[in-house]
Amino acid sequence: MNAKLIAVLEHESQELIRQLDAHPRARQLFEGTLDAETYAHYLVQTYHYVRWTTPLLALAGRRMTARGQHPVLAGLLLQKAQEETGHEKWLLADLRNLGWSAEAVEHAPLSPAVEAYVAWNRFTAEAGSPTAFLGTAYVLEALSSLRAGVAARNLRERSGIPGIHKAVTFLRGHGDADEGHVAELATILGSLTDPDECEALVLSARTTRALYPGLFEETMTAARDLGPARH
């Protein structure tokens, strides 16, 4: 088993969690004390990267299959594309229960971090190392397994946001599922020894760790100016 690779991926995951725990808005999300406007901003930004997850995972899986290399990893990419199908609809449903129409979500301004995240993963899926997306997946699923379920529970119990019990579908769903996903990833990726593929995984994990805190940063002014479009 490539214990060094898994140790590096785990380090990147834990470093992201450390950064978010120290970030005022992310910490409020985890503690369930985030206000409705900031929570909606987080969900909107999340929607705009999650909507790309399934098509890019599928594209990466098809490219790897066409190469005829690492068939287990190719199968894992295609499997994860199926697992992630429809998760953007969870976000739209959560936002609808906070008063946002689908049209308002679609036209909301994207944070630079989301634009960079989508561009990076689109590059690796279309033209770079397709394996790299699994580095992204490892970090995000590790984060979800440790914080998403907690955030969903705390928001329901502490936030006082109107309709919050119907607006934590995305967080609750990922908190329930991603612990097993991380273990599966570690088992499969631990068999990888190709230095170039390992480097691509680590680079993508580090890129994700660097970008993700930006979901909580500004563009909030622009989001406030747009405001939710209520039904």
Image (spheres, helix red, strand yellow):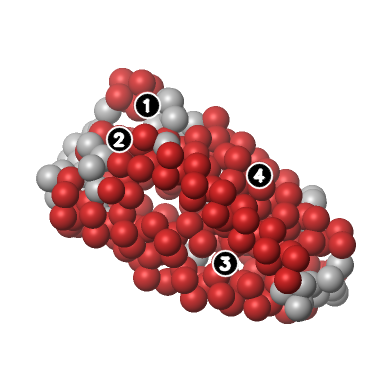
Q: Residue at 18% of width from left, 55% of height from top?
A: 156
Callouts 1 and 2 close, C-beta under 8 Å: yes
Disc 3, SS: helix
Q: Quadrant of residue 77?
A: bottom right
Q: Is the residue marked by circle 1 packed among few (<14), some (14-19), or many (20+) residues within 10 Å?
A: some
Q: Find disc 2 in the rendering and name its residue.
A: 38
Residue type at tag 3: Ala
Q: Find disc 3 in the rendering and name its residue.
A: 81
Quadrant in which the N terminus appears:
bottom right
Q: Find disc 4 in the rendering and name its residue.
A: 207
Q: Find disc 1 in the rendering and name its residue.
A: 220
For marks 2 and 3, give the one nearer the viewer: 2
Residue 87, percent from left and from top: 42, 60
227 left or right, relative to 123: left
Residue type at tag 2: Thr
Q: Residue at 63% of width from left, 72% of height from top?
A: 186
Residue type at tag 4: Thr
Mark 2 or mark 3: whose residue is earlier in sequence: 2
